[in-house]
Amino acid sequence: MSRPHGDSYDHPECPHCGHADEEWWDGLSRHIGDGDTFTPTCDGCEKEYEATMTITYSFSTVAVDQTPAALPPINEDYAPPPALEPYPVKPAT
């Protein structure tokens, strides 16, 4: 099953058979970044294909002087509960 050239996915998909390579970084011999191209071998059909990495950034912002109403105020007197003691292990007899 051949895929159209240039389709974009969250992970490389083989253009020969459509196999999704969700562990694409496994076996890379170098660090890759935005715009870099590498040539993986498909785990499904064992054919090579070319894949190009494209990195997209996403941001979320909130004004510093605005606290979301859903968050309770910070309790300055809060102390975490004491650590639990480990369950005692009885020696083997």
Image (tube, rainbow, N blue to C red):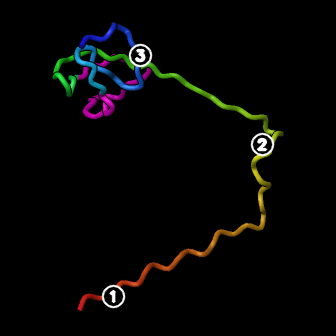
Whichever of callouts 2 and 3 sits on the residue coming sooner in the sequence is: 3
For label 1, count other residues whose C-alpha is less than 10 Å away and answer few (under 14), some (14-19) or many (20+). Answer: few
Q: Which residue is labeled 1 in the image?
A: 90
Residue 83's spot in the image, x, y percent? 56, 74
Q: Residue furthest top?
A: 5
- Mark pair 2, 1: CA separation: 50 Å
| Count of numbered tags | 3
Q: Are marks 3 and 1 in contact (CB under 8 Å)?
A: no
Q: Amino acid at mark 1?
A: Lys
**Stretch of the chain drawn in magenta:** 21-40
Q: Amino acid at mark 2?
A: Pro
Q: Which residue is labeled 3 in the image?
A: 8
> If the image is split into quadrants, where does the C terminus sit?
bottom left
- Mark pair 3, 1: CA separation: 57 Å
Is residue 29 depicted above or below 5 in this figure?
below
Judged from the image, the secondary structure of the residue bearing numbered disc 3 is loop
Q: Which mark is residue 72?
A: none
Judged from the image, the secondary structure of the residue bearing numbered disc 2 is loop
Magenta stretch prevailing secondary structure? loop
Q: Are marks 2 and 1 in contact (CB under 8 Å)?
A: no
Residue 73's spot in the image, x, y percent? 80, 55
Residue 51's spot in the image, x, y percent? 32, 17
Q: Is residue 83 left or right of residue 93?
A: right
Tell me the quarter of the picture where residue 82 sits: bottom right
